[in-house]
Image: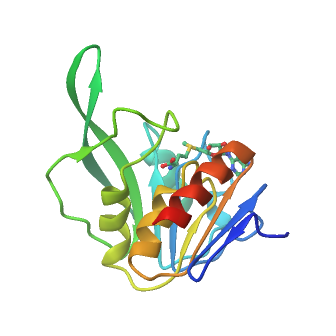
Amino acid sequence: MTPYYQDEYATIYHGNCDVKKADIIVVDPPDLLYDIGSYNYKVLYVFCGHYFHFYQDQLGIGKEWWWTCRHYGNGQMVKTKEPIAIFGKASPENNSPYYIPTIRQHRWERPVELMYDLIYTVKGDVLDPFMGTGSALVAAKGLNRKCVGYDIEEKYCEIAAKRLEEF
Ligand SMILES: C[S@@+](CC[C@H](N)C(=O)[O-])C[C@H]1O[C@@H](n2cnc3c(N)ncnc32)[C@H](O)[C@@H]1O
């Protein structure tokens, strides 16, 4: 597949992810991932919603880590807790909230600071098979890590490419 965007650290592909291997894999899927067992990683982070036990059944021992999300909704600041399933040796410890930008470029845009905290304690390259706005790639590039992201929607490839270019 020809890259949609490439720089010294980051590569973006417009399409389905055909790679399943990286040191750090960050998965924020649109739906339940039935093929989660086919990924090969040192550490896997899954934005798992209510499905931690589904992923644990597929992958064995893992842990559920809750991050605090602050965002503006219904005219006021809202604080929610959201789970990430962690497989492999990684222990993010930040208990302070991460802020979602008021003007988002994607309904599920994640904070770059959160991605940074997930990535920086583990050595190696990063794969995000469902990158959306590319928050994980922006964090990885900030840490001088090689990173690859995929999205089937071109508009998100464009948004992610612009963020990486401007970083
Ligand atoms: C939950 S969002 C990810 C948001 C991202 N974490 C961020 O910070 O912006 C999931 C993304 O997966 C993309 N997607 C859906 N199916 C896909 C597929 N088969 N291959 C690649 N990307 C896909 C969607 O277009 C969407 O942007």
Q: Which of 165 and 73 is in front in this view?
A: 165
Q: Position of residue 127 (x, y in %)?
A: 58, 69
Q: Nearer the viewer, residue 103 or 40?
A: 103
Q: Nearer the viewer, residue 111 or 30?
A: 111
Res. 117 image quadrant: bottom left
Residue in the image at 47% along x and 81% along y: 145
Q: Where is residue 60 in the image (x, y as percent from the top left)?
A: 47, 64
Residue in the image at 58% along x and 57% along y: 162
Q: In this view, does 165 lie above or below 23?
A: above
State the residue lying farthest toward the right.
1
State the residue lying farthest toward the left.
96
Q: Where is residue 14 in the image (x, y as percent from the top left)?
A: 76, 56
- Relative side of 40 to 4, left or right: left
- Relative side of 64 to 87, left or right: left
Residue in the image at 26% along x and 48% along y: 67
- Relative side of 94 to 137, left or right: left
Q: Can residue 153 be seen in this view?
A: no
Q: Which of 13 and 32 is in front in this view?
A: 13
Q: Quadrant of the N terminus?
A: bottom right
Residue in the image at 40% along x and 55% along y: 85
Q: In this view, does 140 lie above or below 158?
A: below
